[in-house]
Image (spheres, rainbow, N blue to C red):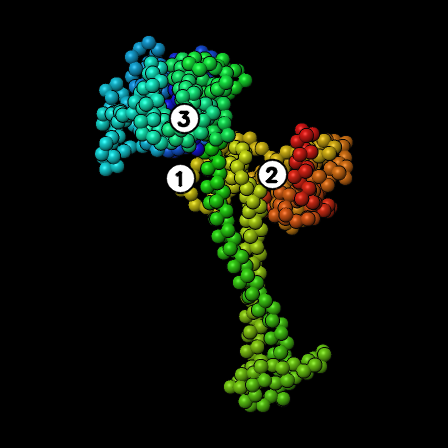
């Protein structure tokens, strides 16, 4: 993940100053353990600024409105208590070439600052610290004890100290090319490495983009550059400094991440001339939008992978235990299936007592109906009546076991069916694509917590008011097909969204998503529409890799949820069957998108 460097931070703060000063602080909300959001209102509108101290995604930028979930963090509560209603009057670096931003709050614009909120955007050392006018730390995102750092402890009640000063040379537009070149090439080495370690404000992303814009190889040695190549690179250096000085930035995404500098092509400028900064392009996203989009996507992707692994591992463990328990119950039922055999043998023995002789270990008697010989094992220490009584007792014991085990097996099987339904929803979410995928996982986790399969003490509930986004497709005739992403959405789709004209689809006795073909009054689904719905329903099921899958469909009024049933579990009647072809789904995706 690309970290926020000095150039990006300068660009972000330049935009924030232009658009959000002065502003009234209306609300403070902590999104997670690394990000706090400030709700600001200006004469032009209202928005949220995110301050993040994430170890690899620390940043300051305009973000999305937070979810409607209670904020239970102490840090944000302390910020609300001290800063609510005050005016944000300044967003300024504490010193040149440092990645520490001072957000100053006063009663109203023009008055002295009462509070300083320092955002230290410094990778794994990032922090957000609130101090009063006396420069004492009132609260901070995370405290650093003297044991953790002897150089710079950060604790409430102690004076705020700046991070240790950088010792590298300060970049300057007035520095000559000879001086700049000699500093970089004094010790021969890789071009990118020498640029990184000789000047402040450098970052890997900036250096790579600067060198490549000059048509040079970042890995090449400084000894291999000819005078023209040094000249080209120096022009990029001056161009970068000029953009910083004039606050002229042009953000855009790159294959590796993003950039806020629009480097000119080498051939577009005369040697010795400083290339001008490009004019702003309204079609390109702002620095705020790029930062919010990039880091939200990257963090969501990490959270998605971790959460999916956690849920998959938990499901696999629980299902393995349940299947073992089910197999044990099935074995006991198999044993109890011999109960009637023991009774018939006992009856046969009682009817033929005259054929028993002392010391017999077995006896062969003709069956009542077939008259075929039946061999009955005997205990030689017991007489015939006692052996028969033992067989009767065994019959009663196995019969009682069957009565006890059958409901236990049914309950375990019901649990397995439910968890396999959840497993299917997870299997469809193979990779992160958008925020809906993460929301779907969060809903699955919340469902498993509510069903007592997961124990998460500090879990925060998802936003109940968040819009439910089903999978949406268009059939060949233009009808809308909705497919649930998880059990919560399946229940919503089947029992709240569906109306009397729709058709409900599900794979036959195979775990999978509920699907709903939306029909208007007076319209009839063609065979191609039914086949489309069946193919898509089969794809979002456990049998998605099969050639053909039986799919049932019926009217929603014939779908019921049994009393006490788990989420997503239903029964239905008056169903019809269509054979779905899940392998056709990828082609159907394209057709549906083209129609949409």
Q: Is 130 placed above or below 173 here? A: below
- Tell me the number on the disc at residue 516: none
Q: Is 379 placed above or below 304 here? A: below
Q: Quadrant for residue 224, please give it.
A: top left
Count residues near mark 3 (Cα–Cα under 10 Å), then give few for <14, some for 14-19, many for 20+.
Answer: some
Circle 1/circle 3 CB separation < 8 Å: no
Question: On the rendered image, what quadrant is the N terminus found in?
Answer: top left
Q: Residue at x 44, y 15 (%)?
A: 271
Label 1 and label 3: CA atoms lie apart by 57 Å
Residue 516 is situated, as x and y percent measured from the top left of the image, at 66, 37
Q: Is residue 311 left or right of residue 198?
A: right
Residue denoted by label 3: 225
Residue 402 is situated, as x and y percent measured from the top left of the image, at 57, 65
Residue denoted by label 2: 484
- Tell me the number on the disc at residue 458: 1
In this view of the protein, can residue 322 be seen by the observer? yes
């Amino acid at each position: 993940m690309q970290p926020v460097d000095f150039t990006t931070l300068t660009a972000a703060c330049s935009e924030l100053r232009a658009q959000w000063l002065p502003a009234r602080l209306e609300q403070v909300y902590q999104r997670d353990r690394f990000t706090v959001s400030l709700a600001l209102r200006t004469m032009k509108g209202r928005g949220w600024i995110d301050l993040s101290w994430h170890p690899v995604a620390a940043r300051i930028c305009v973000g999305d409105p937070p979810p409607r979930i209670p904020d239970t963090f102490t840090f944000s509560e302390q910020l609300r208590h001290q800063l609510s209603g005050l005016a944000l009057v300044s967003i300024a670096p504490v010193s040149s070439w440092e990645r520490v931003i001072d957000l100053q709050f006063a009663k109203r614009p023009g008055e002295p600052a009462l509070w300083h909120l320092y955002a230290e955007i410094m990778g794994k050392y990032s922090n957000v610290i609130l101090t009063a006018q006396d420069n004492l730390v009132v609260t901070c995102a995370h405290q650093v004890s003297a044991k953790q750092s002897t150089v710079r402890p950060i604790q409430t009640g102690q004076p705020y100290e700046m991070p240790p000063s950088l010792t590298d040379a300060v970049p300057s537009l007035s520095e000559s090319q000879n001086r700049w070149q000699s500093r970089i090439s004094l010790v021969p080495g890789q071009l990118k490495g020498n640029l990184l370690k000789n000047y402040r404000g450098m970052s890997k992303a900036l250096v790579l983009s600067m060198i490549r814009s000059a048509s040079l190889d970042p890995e090449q040695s400084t000894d291999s550059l000819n005078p023209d190549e040094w000249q080209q690179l120096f022009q990029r250096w001056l161009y970068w400094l000029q953009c910083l000085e004039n606050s002229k930035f042009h953000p855009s995404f790159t294959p590796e991440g993003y950039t806020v500098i629009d480097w000119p092509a080498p051939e577009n400028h005369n040697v010795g001339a400083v290339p001008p900064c490009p004019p702003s392009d309204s079609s390109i996203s702002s620095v705020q939008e790029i930062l919010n989009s990039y880091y939200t996507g990257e963090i969501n992707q990490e959270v998605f992978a971790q959460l999916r692994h956690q849920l998959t591992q938990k499901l696999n463990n629980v299902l393995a235990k349940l299947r073992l328990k089910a197999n044990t119950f099935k074995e006991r039922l198999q044993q109890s299936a011999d109960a009637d055999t023991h009774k018939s043998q006992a009856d046969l023995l009682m009817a033929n007592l005259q054929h028993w002789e002392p010391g017999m270990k077995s006896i062969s008697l003709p069956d009542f109906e077939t008259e075929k010989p039946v061999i009955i094992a005997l205990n030689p220490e017991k007489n015939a009546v006692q052996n028969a009584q033992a067989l009767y007792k065994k019959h009663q014991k196995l019969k009682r076991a069957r009565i006890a085990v059958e409901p236990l097996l049914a309950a375990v099987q019901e649990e397995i069916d439910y968890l396999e339904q959840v497993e299917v929803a997870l299997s469809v979410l193979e990779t992160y694509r958008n925020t809906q995928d993460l929301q779907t996982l969060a809903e699955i986790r919340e469902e498993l917590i509510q069903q007592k399969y997961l124990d998460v003490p500090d879990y925060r509930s998802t936003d109940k008011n968040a819009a439910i986004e089903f999978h949406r497709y268009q059939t060949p005739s233009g009808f809308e097909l909705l497919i649930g992403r998880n059990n919560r959405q399946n229940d919503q789709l089947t029992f709240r969204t569906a109306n009397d004209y729709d058709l409900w689809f599900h794979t036959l006795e195979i775990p999978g998503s509920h699907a709903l073909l939306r029909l208007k009054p007076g319209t009839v689904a063609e065979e191609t529409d039914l086949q489309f719905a069946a193919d898509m329903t089969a794809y979002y099921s456990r049998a998605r890799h099969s050639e053909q899958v039986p799919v049932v469909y019926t009217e929603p009024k014939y779908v019921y949820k049994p009393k006490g049933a788990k989420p997503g579990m239903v029964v239905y009647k008056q169903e019809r069957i269509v054979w779905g072809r899940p392998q056709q789904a990828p082609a159907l995706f394209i057709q549906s998108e083209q129609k949409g």
